[in-house]
Amino acid sequence: MEWYIGLIIGVAAGAIIAVAIFLLVPTLRKNSAKSAANGIIRDAEIKAEHITKNAQLDAKQAAFEAKQQAQNEIRQMKADAQIEQKKLDAREASIDQRDAALLKREEVLDQKREELEGGIESNKKKSQELSDKIDSIIAELEKVSGMSVKEAHDEIMARLENKMSAEIAAYIKNAEDEAEAQAQEKATNLLALACDKYAQDVTTERTVSVIALPNDELKGRIIGREGRNIKILEQTLGVDLVIDDTPEVITVSCFDPIRREIAKRTLEYLVKDGRIQPGRIEEVSAKFTRELKQETQKAGEEAAYKLGLPRINRELLGYLGRLKYRTSFGQNVLQHSIEVAHLTGIMAAELGLDQNLAKRAGLLHDIGKAVDFEQEGSHVQLGYDLAKKYGEPEVVLNAIASHHGDTECKFIISHLVKAGDTLSAARPGSRSETVENYIKRVQELETIAKGFDGVSQAFAMQAGREIRVMVDYEKVSDADAVIMATQIREKIEKEMTYPGQIKVFVLREYKAIEYAK
């Protein structure tokens, strides 16, 4: 029984202990969790405090750096302002010096003007006194001679003319002989002077192209911001662009006709397209450079094909095609070359020579003009070197070298090329004048010659470069013919405008002419 009671007591004690444990565990867990949470909160507070302190330090550092940068910029601006102020002060001082110099110069000029006015007044008085003395002397001479001044002048001139006409004619003849002896030197000097006088007109006419614009706003776009577009255009195209006050127009200036043509096409395309920017400029320029190269090649090949000339080097034909955009005295050089080839071929056929070889020489005689604007030397020497490089025959080389008389003509074909070149250049309207102007000039030339007493006929020859005057041998002596030639020349120079020179040829002779039929 005792063990039963002990068992019950033990069970009861275990139950009590179990209940106690069941009640105490949650409390212990709660206290442990609370303690852990407090630790986490303390750690978070510490970390937050560190983050706040770091943020404050970073903000202070950024503010300090911004302040330092602002102070540096302010110091730099002050230094720049001081430099500009010094420049302005120097410029102001220079202007003051100029003003002072101008004032001094103005004072000197005023003084000189007063002196000149005094001198002019004194000269007027002396001139009047001298005129009065001359009038009194003339009056005395009229009384003594019994003739008026005009009558005395006419009498003296008539006697002098009768006495000196033969001497004047002899003097003119001697002067002509002397001039002929020195013809080469004088001709060289005359050509150099003519080139100098004519250079500006040729430059203005033949080295510019004009581009039309739909409106003046495009000028600003072509110039671009701070001139960027126009700089790229000029550098890429190799030309000078002139943008002035002329409405809706810009001018392209360049000695090289190929570059000028590329520039013209490029600008016209960009104006039409509207997108004017550096990348686009280079793209369009490259496109038209390729197109123009193809066009010149095709033009050279077509010229050779029209003339029936085979086996000309393809690269040489490319140079020939470039003459399409080259002019000489207003005449297109490619058309001139084709024309010379035709004329040379016709003359060679009449003489029984090789017609194709003559055409070839005529076509290539001015090939040097395809490169004379980009290489040193005359177009004759450049053409000779170019043709020799591509293996042209000796006949062609000599024709190129001699067509302006630089070397001796070794072949008959060379003479024919020279003649064909002259014929093509001298025909009416070929160079810088219309047929109407040519006819008017010839008529005016003949009218001037026919206006002299003793002239029976006058004929303008050589496309107006020579005037042949037929005189009546009964009315005009040999001495009179020499004087008449001089008078006609002087009247032509005074009343007419013409290119080059005109030869006055006065003929006094009797001719008996019969025709056998």
Image (spheres, rainbow, N blue to C red):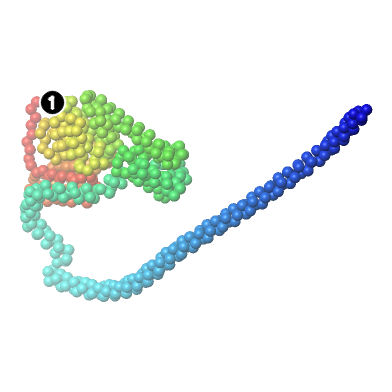
Seen in the picture, residue 307 relative to 468 is either above or below; the reply is: above
On screen, 145 above or below 71? below
Q: Residue at x 46, y 62 (%)?
A: 79
- Determine the image quadrant of residue 421: top left
Quarter of the image where one finds residue 502: top left
- Horizontal and vertical percent position of residue 365: 19, 34
- Most foreground residue, 259 or 174: 259
Give 129 or 298, whichever is nearer the viewer. 298
Residue 210, compared with residue 73, is above or below; it is above
Which element type, helix, strand or loop, lies under badge 1?
Answer: loop
Question: Would residue 326 appear left or right of 53 to someone viewing this image?
Answer: left
Q: Quadrant of the C terminus?
A: top left
> Which quarter of the figure is the N terminus placed in?
top right
From the image, tell me which residue sits under label 1: 353
The amino acid beneath tag 1 is Leu
Residue that extends furthest to the front in the rendered view of this protein: 2
